Amino acid sequence: MFSRASAVSALTVAAVGGTVATPGYPPEAEAATVAAKALRIAASKKGAPYRYGAAGPKRFDCSGLTQYAYKRAGKRLPRTAAAQYNGTRHIKAASRKSGDLVFFHSGSGVYHVGVYAGSGRIWHAPKTGTVVRLERIWTKKVWYGHVR
């Protein structure tokens, strides 16, 4: 049974967008927490300049941003977008959640990655001359991956 203090704490966590661990369900709660942390970390890099091959903390390319965000959240990812795709659990668009990775592809090759922010948007480091930013997904040629 919950005490009044624990119920208030749980409501406070829910109100500020946190997660409440439920006994018997630690893997899902942990995964949600890692994804939420990675999303917050990627968003915190808004405005950081793009630099090919850079993986932070001040400059990023696309896979460098996702690798950096997940590393800071407690999970390791490979360095390139294609390797990150191969290292995730592939999911359907209907199953995507904030913090999952969005992979842009041409045929069978992955060429870009970002962190799904919800509502059809991603945080990503687009290309030379741009900065890390939140943007709408502009194509249907995407695959989704859940970091394990």
Image (spheres, rainbow, N blue to C red):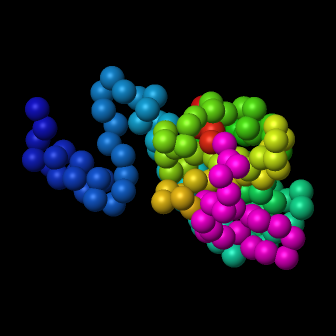
Q: Does the magenta-highlighted stretch encompass residue 106?
A: no
- Residue 139 falls inside the magenta stretch: yes
* Residue 93 placement (x, y as % from top left): 55, 43
Where residue 100 appears, as percent x and y from the top left, is 58, 45
Where is residue 26, by image quadrant?
A: top left
Measured from the top left, where is residue 24 in percent x and y? Answer: 33, 23
Residue at x-position 60% and y-position 65%: 136
Find the residue positioned furthest to the right: 52
- Residue most extreme to the top: 24
Residue at 50 percent across and 51 percent down: it is 98
Number of marks in the rendered image: 0
Is 46 located above or below residue 7 in the figure?
A: below
Q: Residue at x 36, y 46 (%)?
A: 19
Q: Quadrant of the C terminus?
A: top right
Horizontal side of residue 124 vs 97, given as left or right = right
| Residue 140 visible to the viewer | yes
Report the front residue among 1 and 98. Answer: 98
Magenta segment boundaries in residue numbering: 122-143
Residue 72 higher or lower than 90, as above or below: below
Residue 42 visible, this angle: no
Quarter of the figure with the N terminus = top left
Q: Residue at x 70, y 49 (%)?
A: 141
Q: Nearer the viewer, residue 138 or 90?
A: 138
Q: Quadrant of residue 130?
A: bottom right
The reply, left or right, for residue 107 in relation to residue 36 is: right
